[in-house]
Amino acid sequence: MQIIQKLLSTLKEMGQPVHYGTAEELNEKLDNSPYPAIFVERITDTSFIQVGWQQCEQLSCRIFFINRTSYDFDSIENEAIIEECKATADQWQENIKHGNIFRKIGTQNYRRIYLEFLGYFTGIGYQCYLLENNGTAYCYPPPANPDGHNPIQP
């Protein structure tokens, strides 16, 4: 399974609509999505890390947990919506922590979001760094015997 499919599968477990794309594509989906919803900006930064016999992919991703709100971004009701979005993000992090697909690395940063398009949206923007638990395994042939013959190969 590709790294992006792995990430999206962990988010879909939250039971909310999940959208993946560039910032422009996600902006177009904002007005028509059912809410609450999760938006994942297209992943562009990845790297490989050797972990034992495996090559694991590390990624930096931006995930947005968003819901509709009223016009008044300063209201107590708006803060309650942000807290609900944050609770969903926290639950996702717990699922990652206890799952077997990824592990979190480095600092995980939140940012409050206030958006105005055809409607008003608020929530949490989450910058996270994840490392695959199980990457691509590499098996190297055992060293040859002193006579130069590899016992595994004919």
Image (spheres, rainbow, N blue to C red):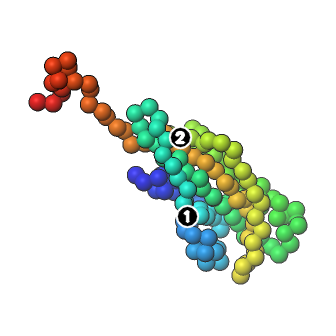
Q: Identity of the amino acid at label 2? A: Gly
Give the left or right position of residue 100, taking residue 29 as reference. left
Give the left or right position of residue 46, taking residue 32 as reference. left
Q: Residue at x 53, y 47 (%)?
A: 58
Residue marked by disc 2: 99
* Disc number for residue 31: none
Question: Where residue 111 appears, x then y in whole percent?
Answer: 75, 57
Q: Residues within 10 Å of mark 2 (few under 14, many from 20)?
A: few
* Disc number for residue 42: 1
Q: Residue at x 46, y 56 (%)?
A: 5
Q: Residue at x 22, y 24 (%)?
A: 144
User: Where is residue 66, by image quadrant?
Assistant: bottom right
Q: Is residue 12 visible?
A: no
Alpha carbon distance from label 2 to label 1: 23 Å
Residue 78 or residue 148, whichever sits in front: 148
Q: Residue at x 56, y 41 (%)?
A: 103
Secondary structure beneath label 2: loop
Q: Is residue 69 visible?
A: yes
What is the quadrant of the C terminus in the image?
top left
Secondary structure beneath label 1: loop
Question: Where residue 152 appears, x then y in whole percent?
Answer: 18, 27
Residue at the front extreme of this rendering: 147
